[in-house]
Image (cartoon, rainbow, N blue to C red):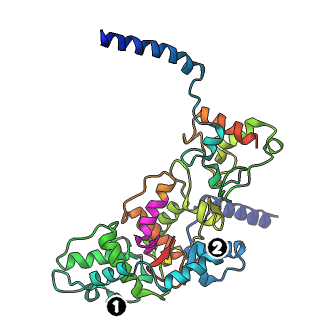
């Protein structure tokens, strides 16, 4: 039967293709993409970052981060909620207000800490 | 010494009382503090240049603005606004018949606190009072095709008038304080207050846009953005709130009226110029 053949071919094709997908699961956006995305980190709105265009000046340039933040956890905490450190900061509390999920925050911190 | 002890006790009592009594807002002190803040921040900026907003902090942009203002791209809109202004209401009377001083040189007096009504009254509310008193329906405050358009002409009749907001009496002070609270309260997912950007952050850039100083902001509305897109002051409040991912009010809310009252007071003494170009 034509339809059965087609169905069989489809199942065969799926079984061949599926392992390929499984080998490379969707990873989602990278830390850099999240940091630069307007709807997510949008770090460039206020901070100069190497490789980013038209950065703002409301916050300090993000460079030499390992020297400035030998403790990566402190950097994580400040991006999660800078208002806990400085109540007058204009910096949004990214994790506290859900602009970034925990997973996204980890990726962004990895990227920023590497600058 | 007993006397010394009494003096010490009184001094202690005084400082305790000062600590528990909430500091009452002093509008003139607020304004002077803001003037000093910006004088420290921008020592070379002349007072009269604050009406240009962020343009005052960028010579090239100010030059471009001045050449655009010689032949503004929105003259068609201004013609429509003038026509609307001259169109009689159902009673046969015009807005000039109804508004104080024929509508001329009055915008700098608004918003004002109306003790009889017990609330802040904006110039737009006076327009709507005129309309309802003359057989017309009130316009929506956020409608750019009606109220916004009318004020694009009406407010130009006060060009050059100095902002002259008064805060007199307890009830007025309360409304002023409410507006001040809105100005300094963080809102939205991004957690910004008006002050974060326009006091602390004024002069800094968000991406490529310079943040304007608070002083002078209330002097030049409505604006025509990007050519002919009419934006009123309260529509801008809503836009700002939206930018920080907070659901703002429809223009004409009590929160925005009180904010406009406080915000405009801080520009007291500066000349008004309506219907200007902005990017």
Of label 2 and label 1, which has the lower sequence position? 2
Tell me: residue B21, above or below residue B107.
Answer: above
Tell me: residue B233, above or below residue A111.
Answer: below
Q: Please tell me if label 2 and label 1 are on a single chain.
A: yes
State the SS at label 2: helix
Corner quadrant of residue A79: top right
Which x, y percent locates residue A87? 65, 51
The subunit carrying tag 1 is B
**Residue for point 67% across, 72% down:** B37
Mark closer to the observer (2, 1)? 1
Q: Residues within 10 Å of mark 2 (few under 14, many from 20)?
A: few
Q: Which label belongs to residue B101?
A: 1
Query: In this figure, what is the number of numbered marks?
Result: 2
Q: Which label belongs to residue B33?
A: 2
Query: Is any part of residue B131 visible from this angle?
Result: yes
Query: In the drawing, does residue A86 fall left or right of residue B182?
Result: right
- Quarter of the rendering occupied by the N terminus of chain A: top left
Q: Which residues are magenta?
A: B222-240
Which x, y percent locates residue A113? 75, 40
Query: In the drawing, does residue B239 fall left or right of residue A108?
Result: left
Query: In the drawing, does residue B102 fall left or right of residue A110?
Result: left
Q: Is residue B235 magenta?
A: yes
Query: Is any part of residue B163 visible from this angle?
Result: no
Q: Is residue A74 magenta?
A: no
**Residue for point 64% across, 63% down:** B205
Q: Nearer the viewer, residue B88 or B55?
A: B55
**Residue for point 36% across, 66% down:** B252
């Amino acid at each position: 039967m034509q339809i059965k053949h087609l169905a069989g071919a489809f199942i065969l094709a799926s079984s061949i293709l599926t392992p390929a997908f499984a080998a490379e699961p969707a990873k989602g956006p990278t830390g850099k993409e999240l940091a630069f995305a307007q709807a997510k980190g949008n770090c460039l709105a206020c901070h100069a970052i190497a490789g980013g265009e038209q950065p703002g000046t409301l916050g300090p340039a993000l460079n030499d981060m390992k020297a400035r933040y030998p403790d990566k956890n402190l950097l994580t905490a400040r991006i999660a909620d800078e208002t806990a450190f400085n109540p007058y900061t204009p910096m949004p509390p990214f994790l506290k207000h859900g602009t970034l999920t925990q997973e996204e925050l980890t990726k962004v911190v990895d990227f920023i800490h590497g600058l | 010494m007993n006397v010394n002890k009494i003096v010490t006790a009184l001094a202690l009592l005084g400082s305790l009382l000062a600590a528990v009594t909430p500091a009452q807002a002093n509008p003139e002190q607020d304004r002077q503090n803001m003037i000093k803040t910006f004088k420290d921040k921008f020592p070379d900026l002349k007072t009269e240049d604050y009406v240009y907003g962020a343009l005052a902090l960028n010579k090239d942009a100010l030059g471009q603005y001045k050449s655009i203002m010689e032949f503004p791209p929105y003259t068609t809109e201004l013609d429509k606004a003038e026509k609307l202004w001259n169109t009689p209401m159902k009673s046969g009377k015009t807005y000039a018949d109804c508004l104080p001083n024929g509508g001329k040189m009055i915008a700098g007096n608004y918003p004002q606190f109306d003790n009889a009504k017990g609330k802040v009254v904006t110039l737009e509310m006076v327009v709507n009072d005129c309309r309802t008193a003359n057989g017309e329906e009130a316009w929506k405050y956020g409608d750019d095709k009606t109220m916004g358009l009318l004020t694009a002409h009406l407010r130009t009749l006060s060009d050059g008038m100095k902002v002259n907001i008064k805060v007199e009496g307890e009830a007025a002070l309360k409304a002023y304080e409410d507006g001040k609270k809105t100005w300094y309260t963080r809102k939205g997912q991004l957690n910004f207050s008006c002050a974060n950007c326009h006091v602390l952050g004024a002069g800094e850039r968000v991406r490529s846009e310079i943040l304007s100083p608070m002083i002078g902001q209330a002097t030049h509305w409505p604006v025509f953005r990007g050519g002919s897109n009419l934006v009123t002051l309260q529509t801008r409040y809503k836009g700002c709130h939206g930018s920080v991912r907070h659901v703002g009010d429809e223009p004409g809310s009590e929160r925005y009226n009180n904010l406009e009252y406080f915000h405009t007071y801080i520009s007291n003494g500066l000349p008004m110029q309506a219907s200007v170009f902005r990017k």
